[in-house]
Amino acid sequence: MVYRKRKGVRYDTWHWCKNCSNYPQSDYLTSDKKPSYGELCNECQSKEKNGNCQ
């Protein structure tokens, strides 16, 4: 699983579901591991819980 966060946005959240409405498409940071800092996206968490994370 790859996590993405927009660059230059101090309080942006980490996303991992490509079908999330806020999934960064350009100018982003990535992490191959669950990030140890920052917030995790509520929409991604919900999609993962419901088995709808793509």
Image: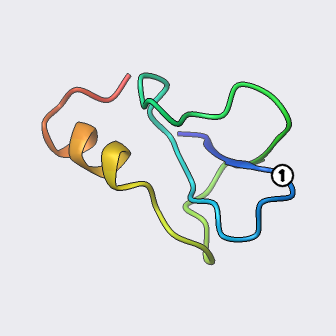
Q: Residue at x 53, y 46 (%)?
A: 15
In the rendered view, does 12 fall on the left or right side of 1?
Answer: right
Q: Residue at x 70, y 25 (%)?
A: 25
Hey, which quadrant is residue 19 in on the image?
top left
Q: Residue at x 44, y 30 (%)?
A: 21
In the rendered view, does 42 fall on the left or right side of 6?
Answer: left
Rendered view: 23 above or below 49:
above
In the rendered view, does 34 fall on the left or right side of 11?
Answer: left
Q: Camera-side residue: 1 or 21?
A: 21
Q: Camera-side residue: 5 or 54?
A: 5
Hey, which quadrant is residue 20 in on the image?
top left
Label 1 packing within 10 angstroms: few (<14), some (14-19), many (20+): few
Q: Name the secondary structure under disc 1.
A: loop
Residue 22 position, x and y percent, is 52, 36
Extreme residue toward the left, this view: 50
Q: Which residue is mark 1?
A: 7
Q: How is the image coloured?
A: rainbow
Rendered view: 35 above or below 50:
below
Q: Residue at x 66, y 34 (%)?
A: 24
Rendered view: 40 above or below 18:
below
Residue 45 position, x and y percent, is 30, 51
Residue 49 position, x and y percent, is 17, 45
In which quadrant of the rendered image does the C terminus lie?
A: top left
In the rendered view, does 38 fall on the left or right side of 51?
Answer: right
Q: Camera-side residue: 32 or 16?
A: 16
User: Which amino acid, mark 1?
Assistant: Lys
How many numbered marks, from 0 up? 1
